[in-house]
Image (cartoon, rainbow, N blue to C red):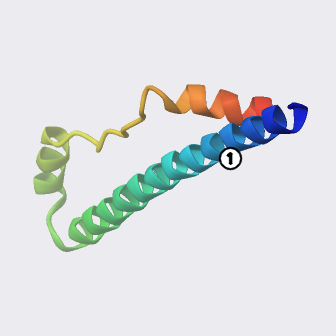
Amino acid sequence: MADNNHDNGLHRCMEAQEQTFKAHQATLDNIQQMLAQLLNNRNNDETTSSNHDEEENADTEPPKTKKSKGSSAIDADVIKCI
């Protein structure tokens, strides 16, 4: 019986780790997209006038990161398993 409880606990920990990994991967993908946009903007800045760029940058908002509400709970589960 104790082995079954131990196996269930390990299974939950592994699932929590997998979900945490997926959340971190999504965050890394988002960062990669933001960096690509920044590099694109930087390249555009070098080819256009500075006045035009200041107006354009004032109108645009930086990309917002998406963080799932459950990710912190999943992170807590992973830490608890460790």
From this view, report whether residue 20 is shown above or below residue 51.
above
Say whether residue 7 is left or right of residue 27. right
Can residue 37 be seen at all in this image of the molecule?
yes
Q: What's the amino acid at mark 1?
A: Met
Residue 54 x/y as whole percent = 18, 48
Say whether residue 63 is left or right of residue 51. right
Residue receiving disc 1: 14
Q: Camera-side residue: 63 or 11? A: 11
Mark 1 Cα shell of 10 Å, populated few (<14), some (14-19), many (≥20): some
Residue 28 x/y as whole percent = 49, 55
Element type where label 1 sits in the image = helix
Give the quadrant of residue 7.
Answer: top right
Q: Quadrant of the N terminus?
A: top right
Residue in the image at 14% along x and 63% along y: 49
Residue in the image at 52% along x and 33% along y: 71
Say whether residue 79 is left or right of residue 42. right
Q: Residue furthest front?
A: 1
Residue in the image at 51% along x and 51% along y: 22
Q: Quadrant of the C terminus?
A: top right
Residue 57 x/y as whole percent = 20, 46
Give the quadrant of residue 69.
Answer: top left
Give the quadrant of residue 36.
Answer: bottom left
* Total count of labels: 1
Can residue 82 be seen at all in this image of the molecule?
no
Q: Residue furthest right?
A: 2
Q: Camera-side residue: 74 or 59? A: 74
Q: Camera-side residue: 50 or 13? A: 13
From this view, report whether residue 81 is shown above or below residue 19.
above
Residue in the image at 61% along x and 44% along y: 15
From this view, report whether residue 43 is shown above or below residue 71.
below
